Image (cartoon, grey):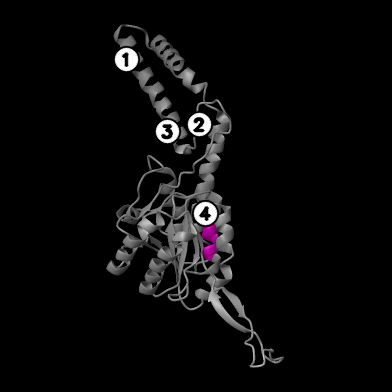
Amino acid sequence: MEMQTVTTPPAANNGGATSSTSAPATVSQPRQPQCEPRTIYDDVTSTLQAIARERARPLLALVSKYINSDDFDELYSWRYALREATQRTSLDVLIYSPGGHLTACYSIARLLSRITNEWEALIPEKAWSGATLICLGSSNLVMAECGQLGPLDPQVLSKKRGKFFAAERQSPLEAFQALKYLREFVVSTVDALMEQLTDRGVAAQIALETAGKLATDLARPVLEKIEPYDLGAFSLDTKLAMDYCRDVARPTDQRKKTQRRALFKSLVEDYPAHEYSIDLGEAQVLKFNATEPSPEVDTLLDELRPRLAQVTAYIGLVPPEGRT
């Protein structure tokens, strides 16, 4: 663990002068994790220390309202302490976040992979979106009763303003689902009109041409508002998410114990909404290595959860008990 050195002045002798041979005394103190707001540091740290004691392994906390490059930089500054802490034991990483910038989350997952061959993720509640991407690098998920992962469809912005898909952040799946709906609408409209026209004695060729024109006219106002540039960009964003998942879950180094069996393609493509809650049971269906915490750890996670709700960020190795 990284240490900071506190230097104390040499003691004065009886005559009030200092000895020329005395050396300043040093006291090593553990580096404290970043915590915002600082007023909650002691309460959060005491519970994290109890979890680390119960689990008998080093505990890294990754708590963030939105994981970004600053969080990566903070975690990167702990790399030497993390390598030292994991020389003889594996690591726990407590993750509490709704997600964040996809590349920042990917970078954190890769950093952890470089530091250690195996780590377990502790999930007291939300580890959504990009935080789920980080979890793909774990060997096991320890999920509380209300622990949740989330889908990994990327959240993007339209590249062109004033178009059909230009608005708030959205999933590319919403755009593709809209196109799927339009396609099905056109086909079903043509089928229905064809049936009505042929029932009235209209020749098949004329009925097909008429039905096709009417269906196209109905769909045209919507289609004209769709920006092809957006659809191409959305497709690339989805491919990026898939590639990141593959790199994190299935690294080429076989010594890395990760979620190699996890169905990450489903995380990117199969869920109907980005807000879909993936609990322990659903995570196991997705073939994550995922387990419940021990009763003792579960109680501590329950105690920790309302405290984490007050935290904007808490990042770093949890110091040993008695050394905060």
If you read the primary sequence from the N terminus, does the residue marked by circle 4 or circle 1 appear first?
A: 4
- Label placed on residue 105: 4
Q: Which residue is mark 1?
A: 195
Q: Would you call the spot at circle 2 few (<14 residues within 10 Å), some (14-19), or many (20 or more)?
A: few
Q: Position of residue 190 (x, y in %)?
A: 38, 18
Q: Which mark is residue 177?
A: 3
Q: CA distance from mark 2 to mark 1?
A: 39 Å
Which residue is most to the right? Answer: 20
Q: Amino acid at mark 3?
A: Gln
Q: Pointer 2: what residue? A: 167
**Above-or-below relation of 11 to 203:** below
Q: Residue at x 57, y 28 (%)?
A: 161
- Residues under numbered marks 3 and 4 in contact, where contact means CB atoms less than 8 Å apart: no
Q: Quadrant of residue 184?
A: top left
- Indicate the amino acid at tag 2: Ala
Q: Secondary structure at mark 4?
A: helix
Q: Mark 3 falls on what kind of element? A: helix
User: Does residue 148 appear to the left or right of 63 in the view shown?
Assistant: left
Residue lying furthest top: 201
Mark 4 and mark 1: span between their CA atoms?
53 Å
The magenta region covers: 108-113
Indicate which disc, 3 or 1, sits on the residue closer to the N terminus.
Answer: 3
Q: Is residue 111 magenta?
A: yes
Residue 201, x across and y down, in percent: 32, 6
Residue 227: image x %, image y %?
55, 28
